[in-house]
Amino acid sequence: MADDYARHALSQRAAFEATHPAVRAAAEELSTEPVLRVADLGAADGVNSHDLIRDLTVLRSGRPLVYTLVDLPTNAWSVAACHLRNAFGPAVDAGDFAVIPALGESGPGVADTGTGAHYAAPEAHGEACRRALDAQPTPATVVSMAGIPLHQAPSLPHGTVHIAVTGTCMHWVADAAGLPSTGSVFPGYPDHTDEDERRAWRLAAERNWEQLLEMRAAELAPGGSFIAAVPASPAACPDRTGLYTELIGDMNRLLADWRRAGRIGATTVEAAVVPVWSRTLDEFRAPFEAGGGRFAGLELESAELFRLDNPYWHVDPAVFARDYVKSATAWGGPLFLGAFAREGETRAAGLLADFLGELEERVAEDPGRHRCDYIEALLICRKRG
């Protein structure tokens, strides 16, 4: 992840901001908690979380807050830590704000895959947060970093999280390696017409959604809230759409054109698949409805769709196309580079540059198509005792 990831993740920022009113309301309800624990799921480099950290710190008025950035073990943790220290430096220096683990820290429960120190297990993570709050002077806010896959384990010990919040990450489908998506970079979209393939993806996404809910139920304290903004679709297949609908269509057509022209082979096109699934509201609700309104102790309080205006919009089509396509490299760059490497390692970077350049041209031809290219669901769940 580049140091300027957040600059090219404006849609993720906007989606995350849609959760903030519900997060603040939940935090106000829990104002008497001695320590408020918030898990920010899929936090990436953390920059899009800084405003919420500030808001909650003010709301707590000096009462302890533990705010956890959670992402994959391979996340850019050193980058996230540096951004935190740059943003909250004076408070860190004064002892009012702590970032853990420290740069280069090692020990039980701390891991580093080469991208920075982070906590790798919920119990060790929870103990580290307790130690941080025991320090003198005692910080009002502790921001911790946990490299724990969201579908595999809770981010903190069972029953200790008061608010779990996420924006634009739970459409990623874990354990979907090898599932084909013939004709479309995003599975399930209109260009993906193979019904058997779509069914396999739908079932994988269904299992993954249940796993994600189970882990949130495990980490949440009774009365705690799970608040999520998740890319969604207003309709099921064959009319499934959602995030980047027009952009994905342009990508699909460009790859098909290159394949017909002999510029790339079929295996390269087959490898250009992003493991995501835009669920419908019915698919989000399904586990709860099957359980009589609850799933794993979670109760779905509300679920609604909303659209985001494209945050990269610019009156100059070329500027808009450049910035919008650049934003796709934040999540798609390594994937496409890996796909193009099937044409030879030495050609991959050049093919990726050409692909992005031609994609910019197609977007600039009719930029208005991309003006409302973001559909999300806002979900609010409560952990019942």
Image (cartoon, rainbow, N blue to C red):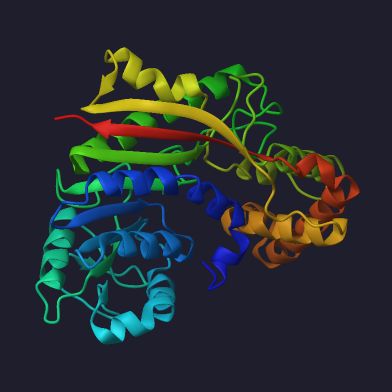
Residue visible at 31% across and 64% down in the picture: 57
Q: Is residue 114 above or below residue 216?
A: below
Q: Quadrant of residue 380?
A: top left
Q: Position of residue 218 (x, y in %)?
A: 19, 39
Number of callouts in the render?
0
Q: Quadrant of residue 60?
A: bottom left
Residue visible at 61% across and 44% down in the picture: 271
Q: Position of residue 188 (x, y in %)?
A: 60, 28
User: In the depicted view, which residue is nearer to us: 1 or 349?
Assistant: 1
Q: Position of residue 65 (x, y in %)?
A: 23, 62
Residue visible at 24% across and 60% down in the picture: 120
Residue visible at 76% across and 49% down in the picture: 264
Q: Is residue 146 above or below residue 218?
A: below
User: In the depicted view, which residue is nearer to us: 30 or 293?
Assistant: 30
109 on left or right of 144: left
User: In the depicted view, which residue is nearer to us: 249 or 26?
Assistant: 26
Quadrant of the frame with the C terminus: top left
Q: Is residue 338 visible?
A: no
Q: Is residue 148 above or below residue 256?
A: below
Furthest-right residue in this view: 365
Furthest-bottom residue in this view: 93
172 on left or right of 124: right
Q: Position of residue 226 (x, y in %)?
A: 32, 39
User: In the depicted view, which residue is nearer to us: 236 or 87?
Assistant: 87
362 on left or right of 352: right
Q: Is residue 122 visible?
A: yes
